[in-house]
Amino acid sequence: MAKLPITVDKIIEDFGPHEAYAPKQGFQGHAEPDKLVKTHCCFCGMQCGIQLKVKDDVVVGFEPWMEFPFNEGRMCPKGVVRYLQNNHPDRLLSPIERVEGEGFKPIDWETAMSRTVSEIKRIQSTYGNDAFAMLSGVSLTNELSYMVGKFARVALKTANIDYNGRLCMVSAGAGNKKAFGRDRASNSWADLKHAEVIMICGSNVSETFPTLIHYIWEARDNGAKLIVVDPRITPVARTADLYLPVRPGTDSALFGAMLNYLVENDLLDHDFIDNYTSGFEETISSVKDHTLEWAEGITGIPAASIRQAAEMWGRAKTSFMLHARGIEQHSKGVDNVLGCINLVLATGRIGKPYCGYNTITGQGNGQGGREHGHKCDQLPGNRDITNPEHRKYIASVWGIDEKDMPGKGLSAYELVEAIHRGEIKGLISICFNPIVSLPNNNMVREALEKLEFYVAIDFFLNETARHANIVMAGALHEEEEGTGTTAEGRVVKINAAVPPPGDARADAAILKELAARLGVGDKFAYRNSEDIFNELRVASKGSSVDYYGITYEKIEKNFGVFWPCPTLDHPGTPRLWEDKKFLTPDGKAHFNPAPYRLSAEPVDAEYPILLTTGRVVSQYLSGTQTRRLGRLNDSYPEPLLEIHPSLAQQYGIKEREIVKVMTRRGEAEFPAQIVTTIRQDTVFIPYHWGGRKSANQLTIGVLDPTSKMPEFKVCACKLVPTGVIAPPSKESLAYQSR
Amino acid sequence: MALEPEKNFNPDMEFFVDMQRCIGCRACEAACAECETNGQETMIHVNYVDRAHSVQTTVQVCMHCEDPACANVCPADAIAKDSNGVVHSANTSRCIGCSNCVMACPFGVPKKMEAAELMMKCNLCYDRTSVGKKPMCATVCPSGALFYGTREEIRKMRPNSDPVNTFQFGAQTVHTKVNVMMPKGSTALRVH
């Protein structure tokens, strides 16, 4: 494939992003809606309950769902305006096809399907089955996640299927499995409110999971002490009892030093360690030299603060450990996660009321999406694709011969690298925008230009889909029934509020027809989403992620059901490990040595500054959805370079001066925002934007060896001020600018 | 000029603002702008105190004064307080866009919408509160910085804080229907 069929500007003119402030047909006055549909927000892993107002088969607004127990009506700004995506002017209403020099033109489904299937067959007969790959996303429901994994293995017969949770949750998942044998937050959020100490590592909770913050504030009203580990003073860090301004890439040194302090001062739960864990001796011997002073030199956190943290953590009776991408998106993300888990195990504060260890899922269905088999190394029920027994069981559920099931494939970034090398020739993607969300995205762009055929299934023409030969108009979250699993492990019901508009189709219908045309229609003969869910229940039965006892009816009746739920009369499991029976081979929770090592790209004389990336409250991931919602853009209109005044002074950078940020992979320009709320050796850029504003032009594609998670959170950069002062921020004119 | 109150408005329900909890997310602004009465303009405003040094934000919402200066100075009798204590936005058929209210309000709340030559401000989501619902901003606020409920509820929820609705502007004391949450034992906020 060549480059884009027309200029980016022309594509944007045709397909956006354009900003919606109101429904396309205008507000409809105070007229009663035809119906209110109880469902869940389409954004982060909290999956807040919401009611969508529907009038004439269009979502026209929302009404808080006060009864849903997690959020009781509370929403973040993204949830408030999400309804504007339905009937958005940019919405794809039919399949479209690339026409050289003209852009994208509408085509009928017959053409889209037949051309796609003939290209899949051509590429696979020429280069082999694995030369056609699939990339998936975890905005998909559980049913679609399951169906995509099965589609790739049974219909495409390719090993190369992976998902965008590879950029989000895999380090946490790998750490969880190593330590506990199960990948799920240990507790429902309700337990958080009563913990004595809460330690948040690398999570800007208030901007990325705003509705969870209510639980943290409530805990503090109940007397909880809060420790926050972050290179930036985020809104939650601002209020902390103890703020630890960690140097990016050094978290494991902090956790190692804290563990060593707990050991030296005997702040341990010996009964729990002796009876319910293994690997303790080996682990503590790996940190015996990790003094507070040693850790201060590496992390930049004063030794006294580390001691204080260890004292607060060690002497508490109840505690909650939370972490997110800040410690996970590293080439040693799994080690960081294990470092946190070691602190939890050493104090034995798991499997008890108000004691927990929760990884905060970033993407909407990040939890469910990592359970049902669209990872390159995984089958449904979080089963291992290399395990003969697991393969045999899933093959029997799918009605195929186990030997016909492909093996382990390439992870997301590796898969794109294989495209770049010319080893993979064809790609189908669904709800994944790697050109914005993967690191080192100049490589991603080059890779896309080398594909012989690329078909995307999506509801907007995102930056990656602009490179497609065909884009199939899929469905929004509110247009297809299914289930999602929240960050606390609660399986919730996503109810369809409206049908897909125009000629757009439900994603399940698209995959079903493609499967039929690929000759395996009998394996995808689902009548509805409940059929898929029922097969998923069977596929998960007996696994570490057992959904068998969950039904649609049970979910609706109980405001969701926590897995594992192995039988129909089982109430679900909000709090894990109360029986102290862990799912590891020896039945014990495992301590794991997690020694500190350098990040992939330390600073040096040429690139002397640490660059880290993250999110802002008004945007979500690659911005495919949120950059189309005007009010969200008004809040934070463009990516800014956060820089400390002392670093800014060193380079002579002024407020809102446009600064060229350069790394070994690329360069981009951002207005400076000079703030004392960031470390002096670190700059921060949010990553939600594409093209010239993309932070991921700069980040590094080095992966964690276990989880294959890229190192988004730290690389080396240099700054070059341009002398040009950007105009006043649109933010200052927000809500008056329309 | 007093308006007749809606009979489903519950006078025991009050509005509480807890600035410490504000995370600057602007969910309140987005939710307020959904209100058709406002013409999709937000009547609540979130501002950084000093972004160069802190991520602390504040929420600016109409305090619904017991003796509203905005109404008192209105030459056109466009602003009215009802017997439930809700100070309503300017009656569009009366408002002459003179900005007296904008200058008089000690909390800096009313805004003149230049394009429409009208004053607009929060009316405590009267379309919702008058039928027994909560104001949209307080309903959606993800952090609990805004709360609408009874004094008893907030006392139970925030044992370390007290609601305060007495403000001291120099020699002038202003009582409001809306409360701010302050450290336990506080009874008034001296503004300057």
Image: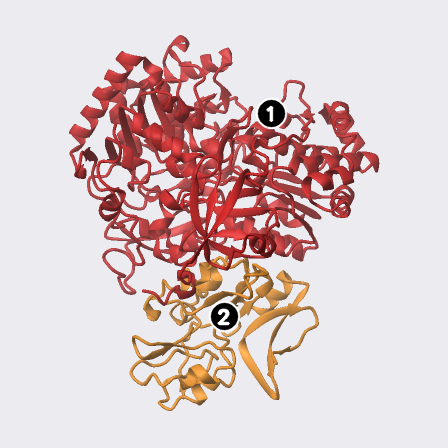
Chain colours: A red, B orange
Q: Read off the chain for label 2.
A: B
Up the image or down, A8 lies above or below B61; here it is above
Query: Which quadrant would residue A268 be assigned to in this image?
Result: top right
Name the spot of residue A374 as percent of width and height, x first. 42, 26
- Return the residue found at the far bottom: B75
Quadrant occupied by the N terminus of chain A: top left
A98 with respect to A277 (left or right) = left
Name the spot of residue A462 as percent of width and height, x first. 32, 40
Q: Amino acid at mark 2?
A: Gln
Q: Read off the chain for label 1.
A: A
Instruction: Determine if residue A353 is in view.
Output: no
Up the image or down, A691 lies above or below A577; here it is below
Viewer-proximal residue, A185 or A50? A185
Up the image or down, A363 lies above or below B137; here it is above
In the picture, the disc for residue B140 is none
Name the spot of residue A645 as percent of width and height, x first. 58, 56
- Return the residue found at the far right: A265
Where is mark 1, residue-wise? A181
Name the spot of residue A136 as percent of width and height, x first. 38, 30
Label 2's element? Answer: strand
Where is mark 2, residue-wise? B60
B43 with respect to A195 (left or right) = left
Quadrant occupied by the C terminus of chain A: bottom left
Instruction: Determine if residue B50 is in view.
Output: yes
Viewer-proximal residue, A273 or A425? A425
Q: How far apart in space, not on screen, are marks 2 and 1 (Cα)?
A: 49 Å
Viewer-proximal residue, A649 or A510? A649
Label 1's element? Answer: loop
Q: Give neighbour class at mark 2: few <14, some 14-19, many 20+ (Cα, 10 Å).
A: some
Q: Are marks 2 and 1 in contact (CB under 8 Å)?
A: no
Q: Amino acid at mark 1?
A: Gly
